[in-house]
Amino acid sequence: MSLVQIGALEVISLRLSMPLAGAWTAEVEVDTGEHLAGAVVVAMGVEDAAPVEFSGTVLDSRAFEGRARAFIVGGRGGLRRELPPRQYQLAPPRLVVSAILREAGEEAAELEGLDGLPLLARWVRARARAAEALNVICRRAGVVWRVRRNGTIRVGVEAWPAYPGRPFCVSEDGAHARAVYAQGAPDIEPGMLLEGRRVGRVVHHVNDAGAFRTEVIFDEGGS
């Protein structure tokens, strides 16, 4: 039986999608007659296992007949904020990325992947949402940004560390590079090597019967 909560509230069903690049999102149904708002922590575990926590922000929520549905995004909710244009000369990419995160109200995690990159002789940041501004500068710098479970933002080159646990595969679709795992905790993440294959996207599911599964979409295009 899955144990998933937001604060003291029981989560009835959940679909949490973690991409290789970008912010994770979650669609949840919660046992409460009140809508959710603001910063939340989704705590996910199975039976006696310690919960794995996901820190995010509610972007939309509605309550009906004793249940609330909510859409949650990883981080502080500022990645959809529109930022004003800015111009830079002889700027390190780390400076440009740090400014985007600061203006969006998001928290940086690892930015070491930007250290040592060539200076940008001239860089114009167009008026755009923070997420799109990050996409543009990261493509230019040859790095990837991703919101981590704790809501902070990592920017860098993928290292592809091996998954430290013991995966238990319950089904596989080789034609579409997908597999479903039954784990004791939702600790498989994008950017890992799972059984020698690169994890591109992870989707954690909990249905209204309490069954917990992790769907993995492998990144078959990497070298």
Image (cartoon, rainbow, N blue to C red):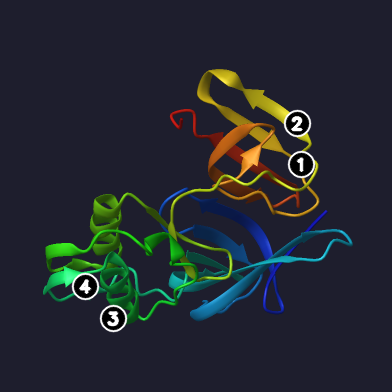
Task: Looking at the image, tell me whether mark 3 or mark 1 is earlier in sequence order.
Answer: 3
- Indicate the amino acid at tag 2: Val
Residue drawn at x 35%, y 62% is 116
- Which residue lies under the disc numbered 1? 182
Gap between marks 2 and 3, in whole Å?
A: 44 Å
Q: Give the left or right position of residue 177, taking residue 7 as reference.
A: left
The residue that mark 3 highlights is: 103
Instruction: Assign a secondary structure to mark 3.
Output: helix
Q: Give residue 148's position: percent from left, percent from top.
A: 53, 63
Quarter of the image where one finds residue 83? bottom left
The residue depicted at 49 percent of the width and 34 percent of the height is 219
Residue 170 badge: 2
Q: Amino acid at mark 1?
A: Ala
For marks 4 and 1, give the CA distance.
39 Å
Label at residue 82: 4
User: Marks 2 and 1: in contact by CB < 8 Å?
Assistant: yes
**CA separation, marks 1 and 2?**
7 Å
Q: Is residue 156 toward the left or the right of residue 201 in the image?
A: left
Binning the other alpha carbons within 10 Å of mark 3 as few (below 14), some (14 to 19) or many (20 upward) gives some
Q: Are marks 4 and 2 in contact (CB under 8 Å)?
A: no
| Horizontal arrangement in the rendering, residue 96 relative to residue 87 (left or right) | right
Camera-side residue: 80 or 197? 197
Three-letter code, disc 3: Glu
As measured in the structure, the alpha-carbon distance from the residue carrying label 4 to the one carrying label 2 is: 42 Å
